[in-house]
Amino acid sequence: MEMTSAEIRQKFLDFFKSKGHHIVPSAPIVVKNDPTLLFTNAGMNQFKEYFLGNKPAPYKRIADTQKCLRVSGKHNDLEEVGVDTYHHTMFEMLGNWSFGDYFKEEAIAWSWELLTEGYKIPKDRLYATVFEGDNAEKLPASTIALKKWKEYLPDQQIVFGSKKDNFWEMGETGPCGPCSEIHVDCRPDAERDQLPGHLLVNKDHPQVIEIWNNVFIQFNRLKDGSLVPLESTHVDTGMGFERLVRVLQEKHSNYDTDIFTGTIAETEKITGKKYEGTDSLKDVAFRVIADHIRAIGFTIADGQLPSNTGAGYVIRRILRRAVRYYYTHLGYNNPMLYQLMPVIASQFSHVFPELEQQR
Ligand code: SER
């Protein structure tokens, strides 16, 4: 029987708990104490000081689901959202961390075990990317990651990537390192026979998507652009929860999973229009609203009201984009977004009770 999104999230946390990880709550989505960020844009943000060695980590192994927002700064997906079926403003990132403890081999082994044995994703649909090195930065290729992946995957399912895709950085400065991504090819068999999936990895194909990034934090990027090796090495992984659910629920679009169908059904009820999952502006509007209401709701619940400067202005822009879409493309001329909050708050009450509390 198909797993619900709640079961899928729990399975991730239980798996890493069984591997000695301490489960912690998500940090707030609004960042108050880091001038380099307005919003949490990755699960590792709250652990930055542990990576840099400025503070001791309370546990050597941690796992969680983190509320993230990628609408400003280095990671900004806003204009993609709603137009395609797999980018979001706000998303959940499932992550496991090692602070000076296990490194590449264990991280890769566990991600493989969870995906193939835990979630039972067929092995022949999975692809791993490995950092090919970078001469200008004097960075070698990731031979350890490559060797580990070769234990699980044939050569044609391992793809080398450049700094652009396989060297992860939090922002202009901060902890960073080479990474190894995991992609899933969700195309039908006939299409897969015609064109092998490795040719579509990191090519913006809507059915060949990255789901998990395993970052091996080894450096601190300084303001002058230099890379300083850290005293210890760390693991920072991030799996896109909405994408994982889509793969496991065998949908072609994140918006067809039970993470979004409740909001879309409510929007249908309010507007009297039907969501058909096409590329029409009407359907883009349904997706924009389903995505944006989460971003707006979660950030307001975490204390960031829409305003005309800084983080507040980012939220106001998302809010305006949602309003513009329903006004123009769903022909709905009354305030709508507040009507959707009860659905979201109740859907997430077991994992993010702040929405219900702040309603
Ligand atoms: N920091 C990495 C990312 O955001 C992995 O968690 O992709």
Image (cartoon, rainbow, N blue to C red):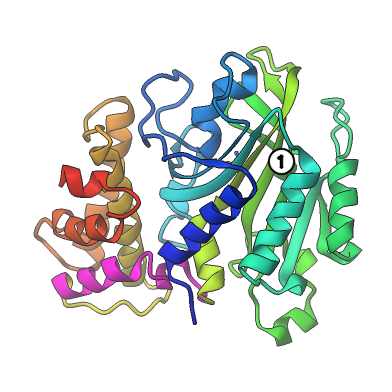
Residue at point 27% right, 25% down? 309
- Name the quadrant containing residue 211: bottom right
The secondary structure that dominates the magenta segment is: helix
Residue 269 painted magenta: yes
Residue at position x 61%, y 70% from top?
A: 207
> In screen coordinates, is 288 left or right of 337?
right
Residue pointed to by mark 1: 164
Up the image or down, 113 lies above or below 207; here it is above
Q: Quadrant of residue 133?
A: top right
Looking at the image, is 295 positioned above or below residue 37? below
Task: Say which amino acid is labelled 1.
Answer: Lys
Q: Secondary structure at mark 1?
A: helix
Within 10 angstroms of label 1, few (less than 14), some, or many (20 or more) residues? few
Does residue 354 show up magenta in the picture?
Answer: no
Coordinates of residue 66 in the picture (x, y in percent): 45, 43
Q: Is residue 218 left or right of residue 268?
A: right
Query: Where is residue 11 shown, x and y percent of the image?
Result: 52, 60
Left or right of residue 125: residue 22: left
Q: Residue furthest left?
A: 334
Q: Quadrant of ligand 1?
A: top right
Q: On the picture, is 227 further left or further right than 314?
A: right
Q: Residue furthest bottom?
A: 190
Q: Quadrant of residue 194?
A: bottom right
Q: Which span of residues is magenta-colored?
A: 251-270
